[in-house]
Image (cartoon, grey):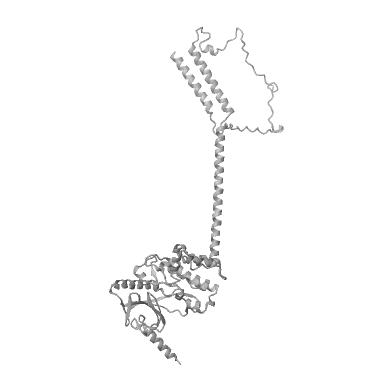
């Protein structure tokens, strides 16, 4: 019978037999941390479960690029002297990313407490999350992943991924074994050892030591120096939920790319209608699993908007409200434009009418007749002089045209064509005729002005003024000729 102590001893011996990882009981940072056991390893580093000086459980991640490193006792050494500069570059990137992750504060992202150097390499201390990873749940308890739980899980992970992308950090290693479920069922993203800040700045040195996970890593991770974007993390997350929903692991993206290059059928068929999941949920996963990054959803926020029913409903309501406001603005603009066109048409019509027809003269306001007083209030008419006893008025005698009557000189006599016996002067006669014409013109103009008064100003019209000026000019011309003669 094998006792528990023998099993633990065998496990300790097995751990001690590994050549790369540190054995249990190893102390780091001058005794601040003590390693309990090995957890896992990858191309970028090794992860341990440890305890700090206050006996709290923590996770230690060691920078150990296995492609260029080995271990002598506890010290990390390089396999070749030509890799010294590259290893220094990787250490600098490891420390830089650890500091960037230490500034993150999110409920669904593991926290970083400390960064230190020991054994010729660098370490970071992270939160220890009590629970199981998603890979264990998929294999051991798939019934716990019902549609409602899966939707809630994806929304929380999208919130965490969007949080790190906003800070220009790529996780680059999203997979079921790097998603822990705590005691409350909330997801926590761990293992940021492969993360790189500056999503568009891919290091050639870092690409050498980063590994890929078949089925979860996108095809651009297989090519050193390839452009990696936020959509690269979305592919890995979509592959994870493809595994959950379809109950089968995803196919390697490298294999899918080869099939596409040959023109063959995609070895990983897209998800179809699955009970418990709406079409928006399924379509978003299929789209993020596109082989080429440009065909995927551009961001975690876009993915969240596509599957969150409440958020999508609110977005539709907001869009409908904006559309209604737009319709009202267009209607007001059209109505104002119609009114403007009507005003312009009326103005044009008025202008054309003013050219075609003569304006009617302004009607003079007839004087109002005076109110007739009653007979009782009327002033009595004066009586005749005879009735008052006065003598009648004396009338002047009528001067007839007889021989004894004195004749009144006429115009012709005053002009020199009368009793003096002289011959008439033709120039004086012309001046006399001009003067008579001028007097007639003035009288005619006054008559016209009284008949057709101006609507606002009591001045002679232009036609009457013109006739007056014409007559006056003729008068002075005639008088000038007479004087000259």
Query: Is residue 333 shown above or below 17?
Result: above
Name the residue at the left extreme: 81
**Residue nearest the observer in this picture, 28 or 467:** 28
> How many numbered discs, if any?
0
Q: Toward the viewer: 239 or 186?
A: 239
Instruction: Please say whether residue 68 is visible from this viewpoint.
Output: yes
Above or below 21: residue 391: above
Nearer-the-camera pick, 194 or 378: 194
Judge left or right: residue 137 versus residue 379.
Answer: left
Describe residue 55's horizontal placement relative to residue 184 as left or right.
Answer: left
Instruction: Indicate the quadrant where residue 51 lies.
Output: bottom left
* Residue 157 higher or lower than 54, as above or below: above
Q: Residue farthest to the right? A: 376
Residue 304 seen by the camera? no
**Figure quadrant of the C terminus:** top left
Residue 15 horizontal/vertical position (percent):
38, 84
| Residue at 51 percent of width and 15 percent of height | 432
- Which residue: 69% across, 27% down? 381
Q: Where is residue 276 in the image (x, y as percent from the top left)?
A: 57, 71
Q: Return the residue found at the far bottom.
A: 1
Closer-to-camera residue (311/1): 1
Q: Where is residue 142 in the image (x, y as percent from the top left)?
A: 52, 77
Taking the image as shown, residue 159 lies to the left or right of residue 405, namely: left
Residue 428: x, y in percent? 49, 13
Identity of the residue drawn at 49% across and 11% down:
426
């Amino acid at each position: 019978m094998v006792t528990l102590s023998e099993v633990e001893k065998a496990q300790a011996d097995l751990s001690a037999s590994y050549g790369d990882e540190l054995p249990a009981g190893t102390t780091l940072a001058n005794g601040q941390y003590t390693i309990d056991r090995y957890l896992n390893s990858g191309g970028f580093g090794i992860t341990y479960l440890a305890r700090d000086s206050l006996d709290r459980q923590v996770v230690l991640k060691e920078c150990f690029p296995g492609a260029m490193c080995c271990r002598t006792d506890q010290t990390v050494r390089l396999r070749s002297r030509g890799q010294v500069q590259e290893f220094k570059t990787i250490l600098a990137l490891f420390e830089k990313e650890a500091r960037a992750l230490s500034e993150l504060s999110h409920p669904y992202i593991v926290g970083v407490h400390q960064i230190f150097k020991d054994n010729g390499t660098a370490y970071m201390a992270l939160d220890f999350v009590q629970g199981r990873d998603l890979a264990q749940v998929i294999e051991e308890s798939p019934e716990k992943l019902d549609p409602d739980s899966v939707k809630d899980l994806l929304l929380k992970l999208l919130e965490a991924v969007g949080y790190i992308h906003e800070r220009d950090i790529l996780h680059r290693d999203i997979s079921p074994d790097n998603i822990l479920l705590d005691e409350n069922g909330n997801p926590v993203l761990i293992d940021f050892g492969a993360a790189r800040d500056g999503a568009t700045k891919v290091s050639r040195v870092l690409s050498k030591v980063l590994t890929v996970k078949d089925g979860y890593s996108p095809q651009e991770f297989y090519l050193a120096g390839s452009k990696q974007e936020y959509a690269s993390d979305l592919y890995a997350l979509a592959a994870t939920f493809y595994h959950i929903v379809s109950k089968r692991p995803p196919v390697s993206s490298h294999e899918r790319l080869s099939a596409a290059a040959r023109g063959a059928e995609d070895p990983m068929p897209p998800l179809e209608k699955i009970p418990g999941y709406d079409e928006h949920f399924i379509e978003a996963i299929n789209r993020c699993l596109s082989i080429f990054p440009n065909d995927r959803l551009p961001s975690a926020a876009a993915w969240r908007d596509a599957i969150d029913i409440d958020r999508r409903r609110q977005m539709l309501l907001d869009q409908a409200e904006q559309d209604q406001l737009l319709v009202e603005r267009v209607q007001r603009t059209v109505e104002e434009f119609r009114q403007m066109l009507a005003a312009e048409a009326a103005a044009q019509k008025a202008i054309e009418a003013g050219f075609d027809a003569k304006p009617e003269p302004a009607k003079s306001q007839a004087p109002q007749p005076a109110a007739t007083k009653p007979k009782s209030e009327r002033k009595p008419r004066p009586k005749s002089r005879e009735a008052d006893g006065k003598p009648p008025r004396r009338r002047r005698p009528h001067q007839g045209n007889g021989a004894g009557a004195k004749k009144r000189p006429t115009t012709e006599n005053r002009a020199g064509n009368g009793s003096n016996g002289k011959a008439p002067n033709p120039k004086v006669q012309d001046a006399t005729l001009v003067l008579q014409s001028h007097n007639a013109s003035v009288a005619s103009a006054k008559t016209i002005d009284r008949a057709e008064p101006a609507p606002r100003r009591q001045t002679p019209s232009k036609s009457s003024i013109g006739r007056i000026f014409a007559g006056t000019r003729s008068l002075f011309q005639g008088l000038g000729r007479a004087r000259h003669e």
